[in-house]
Image: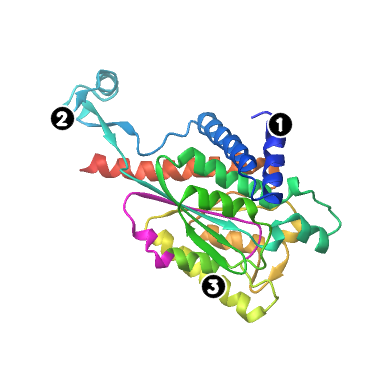
Amino acid sequence: MEEKDLKELWGLCVKSMQSPGDAYLREQLVRGCRGAGVHMLHQYRLDRPTQSRMVYRKFDGTGSLSIHRTMTGFLTHGRSLDQVVTRTRVQLARSLSLALLYDDSSSMSAWWRNKYFPYRLLTEETAPQTSAKIGCLALLEAFGAEADIVVFVFGSQVTGPLMKRENIYQELVKRNGSGGTRLDLALQKLMDLRWHESPGMKVMVVLTDGVPETGRREEAEDIRIQRSVINNIKRVLDSGVQVLYVPIFTDDKLSRFRTGEYDARGFVERIQRMGATTAEVTQEADLLKTLFQGVRRMLQELEEKEAKKILTV
């Protein structure tokens, strides 16, 4: 997308937040996010996993003969039945489930950062929450017809699961910071739904700017929250879910702010060591690109696993 288009989209998001009851503004925003999402799908050649794929395997009496791959095998390894390759069009996944966990902590907003970190004044357009909202809406528009999408919004409390599009859009757009970073509450609600046990491919995306905490500098409670998040992310990973953790580190000083056992960067490193994929955002305008690149990587890894299962049958 052109830079001017991105600026218009960011501006629309801010206007919609300031006038949450304006349905026309919100529709314009959704239309812009739809265009951004489709653009990202094309730019990164991101195919939906529920579409059919061509899978190649050793000859087993089924499928159509792949002349090119068979001849390559003969020339490389000699004529043998093992080098005869067939191709079969298969569907790697019957369903795709996508869970979006959106951070509505106060530190995502411009008003909070300008109050407590006045050395770098932000406009609403450059606040992390604006980019994060656009990223969520673009994902919803890009995958909404293909995937079962559930959204949780977490600050000091958690809202969700949000499943109906109109509810998701209204909730996301109007948010403007609501206290701490209770990712533990969002994860627990997700676990209570047994979402991680649903069939098909599953991807969980966390958009946040800080370390999980109460927002009140309560050391013992912050430690408990952080350990709860780590345990639940481990459970999600162990169940076969691909986890994409997107930390918005547009202010290095804030990302080094420590509470409980971790600062935000240290917590991301801990999540990464567990096997989750992390995709750091250092410029607000890069969030869309980073987010879709990360989702593409998640889906590719899932597709490779599914293809291996099919090839070994």
User: Is 203 covered by the magenta stretch?
Assistant: yes
- Left or right of 276: which side holds 310? left
The residue closer to the viewer here, 144 or 196, is 144
Mark 1 or mark 3: name the one nearer the start of the chain.
1
The residue located at (37%, 63%) in the rendering is 194
Residue receiving disc 2 = 62
Query: Which span of residues is magenta-colored?
Result: 191-211
Residue at 49 percent across and 38 percent down: it is: 142
Q: Which residue is mark 3?
A: 227
Up the image or down, 79 lies above or below 9; here it is above
**Residue at coordinates 25% horizontally, 39% vertically from top-left?**
311
Q: How many neighbours does mark 2 have within 10 angstroms: few (below 14), some (14-19), or many (20 or more)? A: few
Label 3 amino acid? Arg
> Badge 3, how many Cα within 10 Å: few under 14, some, many 20+?
some
Residue 3 numbered tag: 1
Q: Quadrant of the N terminus?
A: top right
Residue 49 seen by the camera: yes
What percent of the width, then of the height, locates residue 97?
A: 40, 50
